[in-house]
Amino acid sequence: MRKWQCIVCGWIYDEAEGFEQDGIVPGTSWDDVPEDFICPECGTSKEDFEMIEIG
């Protein structure tokens, strides 16, 4: 499982946790997140997220 960070505000999407508020269940890979997903913090598009290393 990977994590993806919004390059605008820093919000992190964690594949292991999903984002159930948007109907994205835990374990959903970033590739399977809908293309119209927007950052819940700043409203930017999925294109503005980058995979990050945590640890």
Image (cartoon, helix red, strand yellow):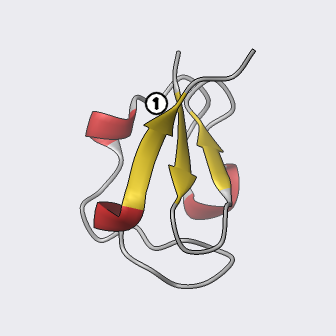
Quadrant (top left/top right/bottom left/bottom right) for the C terminus: top right
Residue at left 44%, top 36%? 51
Dot 1 surroundings within 10 Å: few (below 14), some, or many (20 or more)? Answer: some
* Occupied quadrant, residue 25: top right
Residue 41 point in image, percent of width and height: 69, 77
Q: Element at badge 1? A: loop
Q: Is residue 54 above or below residue 46?
A: above
Residue at left 65%, top 49%? 12
Q: Image check: 1 left or right of 36?
A: right
Q: Image check: 10 left or right of 47?
A: right
* Occupied quadrant, residue 6: bottom right
Q: Is residue 37 above or below residue 53?
A: below
Residue 38 point in image, percent of width and height: 45, 73
Residue 27 point in image, percent of width and height: 54, 22
Name the residue nearer the viewer: 47 or 7.
7
Residue underneath mark 1: 28
Residue 32 point in image, percent of width and height: 29, 38
Residue 16 visible in this rendered orientation of the protein: yes
Q: Is residue 38 above or below residue 13?
A: below
Q: Is residue 48 above or below residue 40?
A: above
Residue 24 visible in this rendered orientation of the protein: no
**Which kind of residue does numbered mark 1 sit on?**
Thr
Residue at left 51%, top 64%? 7
